Image: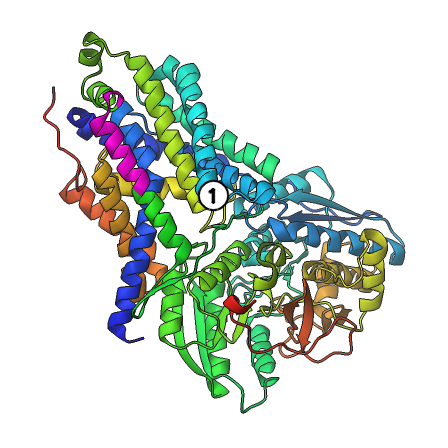
Amino acid sequence: MVEVELVAQTLINGLLLGGIYAVAALGLSLVFGIMDIVNLAHGHMLMIGGYVAILLFSALGVTPLIGMFVAMAVLFVFGMALQRFVLDRIVDEGIEQPIIVLFGLALVLQSLGRLVLGSDAQSSEIGIPGAAIEVGPILFSFPRTVTFVFALGLILGTWVLLQYTATGRAIRATAQNRDAARYMGIDTDRIYVLTLGIGTALAGAAGALLSMLFPITPFVGWSYLLKAFAVVVLGGVGSIPGTLVGGLALGVTENISGLYLGGGFRDIISFSIFLIVLLIRPHGLFGSGGGGE
Amino acid sequence: MSEDTNGKSRRSYLKATGAASVAGISSLAGCTLGGGGGGGSETLTIGATVPRSGSFSSLGQSVERGYQLGVARMNEQLERDVEIVIQDDESDAAQVRQSLNQITSNNDVDMLWGSFSSLLVTAGSAFAENQELPFLGAFFAYEEPHRNEGYEWTYSPFPKSRDVARSTRGLLSLIPENERPTNVGIWEPNSGWGAEQSTYWDDVLSNEGYDVVLRESFQLGSEDFSSLISQSKSADVEILLSVPTPPGGITAVNQMQENDFTPEVLKFVRGADPTAWWSALGQQGAFACMCPGWVPGMTGNGNDGFKSAFESEYGLEDGAVIPTAVGGAYNVAQVALQAVQAAGSTDSDGLQTALRETEFGTVIGDFTFEENGLPSEGQLTAPTGQWWEGGQHVVYPDTQGEEAIDFRYPMTPWSER
């Protein structure tokens, strides 16, 4: 492979990886953008989604592409219950309380995962026939390509939900001004419950997809939270197109910098770019500066 | 979307996340050094940590079994009771220190053992040096701390980076010269040991006439090897060498398979050590080589007795072999046994002198220690094992052991397995 082809292959690897980062960040971005809640347990919810898919695959041979929907259902119910019975009681107490509660929840989920499922790394397989796709000298890994397509589908589906459905409009109205939305007859408490449910369901979907590519342990939550955090800030809080672009940018940056500077510099380069974007455009690439009320 | 509050939210987000992170780090760190060794009592008390959980947990049970078998042997051989107090270190260096602190605070400890990997063993040795307690650390190939940290109480009965590089050269020499691959690729984790081991491989194999066509670093703990795989394909790597973590090694093989890249020789030191390698990869894990310190098929120095003891205590199905980490841990107990016998007491200074002056014979070989705790140069041969039919078998050096096999080469492409 000549240099140009290696760069092209690295670029493709980065884009496929970036799609995965984007879907991992989608739920975090949605919840923060709409509810102003930083879900520090997002990575651990992703971990639960991964384990649901792994258990379904190992026990019943169900491909994670289907297991993903079970994971979404489990996490959707979990997220709604979390908002209804825990966060709803403290949401008016300031931004710190939900963060502390969610940080504690993350630790609880990590410990529970370790006790119930053990610490060994586990993973699933795609479970459907397929081979790497060769396009000229470039090779597309089959599971990564399928994951990328599903990730795009989830992102597009979430965008359509928010843009074109009555529930989506209610969610956006609540996000823009909760009091005004309430005056317009929107049950904002229900919208919050629904939003956290959707956000955690997306985390579950991401976990199920990731379980096909990377090992899942009870400890992966923090690292995925960090990546998701970077994507959200890079793309713009609450922006769905921004999340996609942020994920792709992070994936490509990591891979290209790894190619030219060595993989040891991957995180340094990618997070330096994240810091530069924060300095130059604090609201992220697609975020709005806002104009105050 | 709350576009009107984004600016404020972002600041609050960063501030609160930072606070939460600090709280998290604080909860994981912090322990006051205290307690300390005693010694001189009739009972020999050993403190140890093993990774029962965390990223090295797949090896924790084997290490613990090796220690327990060794302690049983010590109780048979010594005219004093031997007890071992073991705690989980969660594969975390801070937890190693905390666990050792608890063990030494609550027990009259004479000696410390543990744990697994350079990261955890150096954490344990730092504690032991501070407490002036003899410390035996296996599964620790990193040489630099021995030379730079002024070790006085740390001894490492284990093949070191230099031995691993020589063993790799020996392994490759088993391939007939006209079939022998020449292009070496080294994936170097960005850690002290990663750099040290990679440099040894680079030097030893370059001097032997091999062509190191790729030496690329990666983030230790990384789960994405796609760029390294593309670079390896581009550079036509035939012999792939690395020291990934166990989960990282498994992930790397899965991704090589996805990207249709099969080197002719694959050696993942530590990465391919645990039995989880085979349970996760099955036949895809075959052919992979490793240097775990002890491999089934080694002979002499109590290997027969060790195998019998394992079979009797834990059972061994037909065709199954003992996990490699059990032997490495048992070797630690053999060193301790011989040191206590030589010292004639459990006194720390006496044990230290015995460790410096005794010639040890363990399941991994015969050796003495240099003053800095390294096995003396050239005395240990790092055995190379290879995964075959669900077990690890010694392929280099050539032994007459029942479990030894001929080196399988080249690797069958993933797609044809």
Tell which residue pokes out farthest to the left in this image. A291
Residue holding disc 1: A64
Colour pattern of the rendering: rainbow
Q: Is residue A241 above or below residue B219?
A: above
Question: Residue at coordinates 55% horizontally, 90% vertically from top-left?
Answer: B177
The N terminus of chain A - image quarter:
bottom left
Question: Residue at coordinates 34% horizontally, 52% vertically from top-left?
Answer: A17
Query: Hey, what amino acid is under mark 1?
Result: Pro
Q: Quadrant of residue B32?
A: top right
Q: Position of residue B119 (x, y in %)?
A: 53, 55
Is A115 included in the stretch rendered in magenta?
no
Is A155 included in the stretch rendered in magenta?
yes
Q: Callout 1 environment at 10 Å: few (<14), some (14 to 19), or many (20+)? A: many
Tell which residue pokes out farthest to the bottom in this image. B178
Q: State the residue in front, A127 or A252.
A: A127
Q: Position of residue B233 (x, y in %)?
A: 39, 72
Q: How many marks?
A: 1
Q: Chain of mark 1?
A: A
Q: Quadrant of residue A112?
A: top right
Q: State the residue in front, B150 or B101.
A: B101
Q: Is residue A202 above or below residue B46?
A: above
Start and end of the magenta stretch? A153-167
